[in-house]
Amino acid sequence: DKSGESSSDKKPKRNPIKKLVEVKIDHNLIAARMLNIPLPGRTRTVRELCDRFDKWAKDDEVGAILLNLDGTYLAIPDVEELRSSISRLRDSGKKVIAYLHGGDPMSYLLACQADEIGCAPTGRLAIPGLGRLFPFMRGFYQMRGMEFDVITAGRYKYPGFMNRREPDKFFTEEFGEILDGWYDDYVGIIAEGRKMEPEKVRELIDIALFDAEDAMNRGLIDAVAYYDDFA
C-alpha cells in the first residue's frame, strides 16, 4: 500500500530555479605570495577563489556567477589563473556575468572571460596597455659617496639598474622581450574575450580611456546600467 509510505522515504524535490552566486572581487583578493605582507581588512587568495569556482562548476543548483568587480591589484599571471577557472565554469554550462564599477585594467581583463559585461553609467574603462619603470640608481649612490660593482654569471643574469645610470644593450633586449610578451598576452585576452582582431584591440589601447557609453559603442562592454538594475 503506497499510502503507508512514510514521508521520510520520499526524496526531496530539487528546486528548478537555479542559484545566482555573486562574487565580490576587489583589492582584498590577493595572490598567495602576498600573504606575508600585512594588509588591512579580510583577504582571500586567488587560489581560494579558483577552488570555489571549481566547486560551483560541479554544483547543479548553481546556474550563474556574477563577478562584482570593484578594482584589483592582481598581476597578469594571477588574472590568467582566474580566467582558467572561469573558463571551466562556462564549460560546465554556467553563465558568467561581469559588472565593472570603475573599469581598471586588470578587472577588465577578468571581465573579458565572462559571457556578458556591464558597467556603471558613471564608470570609465581604462586599457592603457603595459609599462615598467626602472630606477637606475648609480647617481643616487654616488651622491652619497658610495661606489660598487656587480659581478654577474652572464650578460642577462642581472638587470643592472642598481649600479648603472642608464640601460645597456643586454638590459634593453631582455626587458624588451619580457614586456613584448606581456603586451601580446594583454592584447590576446581582450581579443579573445570580445571577439576582436588583435590589431583593433591595439588601436583601442592607444586611445586607452573610455566612458561607459563609448566603451559599449566600441564593443568593449555589453551594457551600461546601475548595479541593482544589471544584477
Image (cartoon, helix red, strand yellow):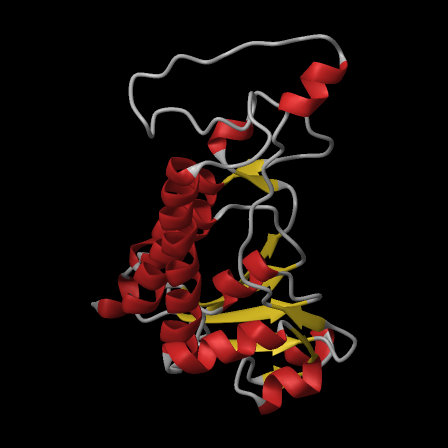
Horizontal and vertical percent position of residue 42: 67, 34
Is residue 119 toward the left or the right of residue 86 in the image? right
Report whether residue 11 is seen: no
**Closest to the observer, 81 or 169:** 169
Q: In which quarter of the image is the N terminus?
A: bottom left
Left or right: 134 with respect to 94?
right
Q: Nearer the viewer, residue 188 or 67?
A: 188
Whether residue 193 is visible: yes
Q: Residue at x 40, y 75 (%)?
A: 191
Q: In this view of the protein, which residue sits in the foreground, 158 or 86? A: 158
Which residue corresponds to the image point at 62% horizontal and 77% vertical from the top-left?
207
Which is more toward the observer, 132 or 209? 132
Residue ranking furthest to the bottom = 217
Which of the 4 quarters of the picture holds residue 226? Answer: bottom right
Q: Residue at x 60, y 53 (%)?
A: 25
Q: Quadrant of the C terminus?
A: bottom right
Q: Is residue 64 shown above or below 44? A: below
Residue 161 in the image: state x and y as whole percent. Answer: 54, 28
Please tell me whether residue 166 is drawn above or below residue 65 in the rendered image. Answer: above
Tell which residue pokes out farthest to the left in this image. 1
Which residue is drawn at the image coordinates 45% and 82% (left, top)? 200
Q: Where is residue 64 in the image (x, y as percent from the top left)?
A: 46, 69
Q: How many labels does the image show?
A: 0
Q: In which quarter of the image is residue 119?
A: bottom right
Residue 63 in which image quadrant? bottom left
Residue 222 in picture, x, y percent from top left:
55, 84
Q: In this view, does 33 lie above or below 18?
A: above
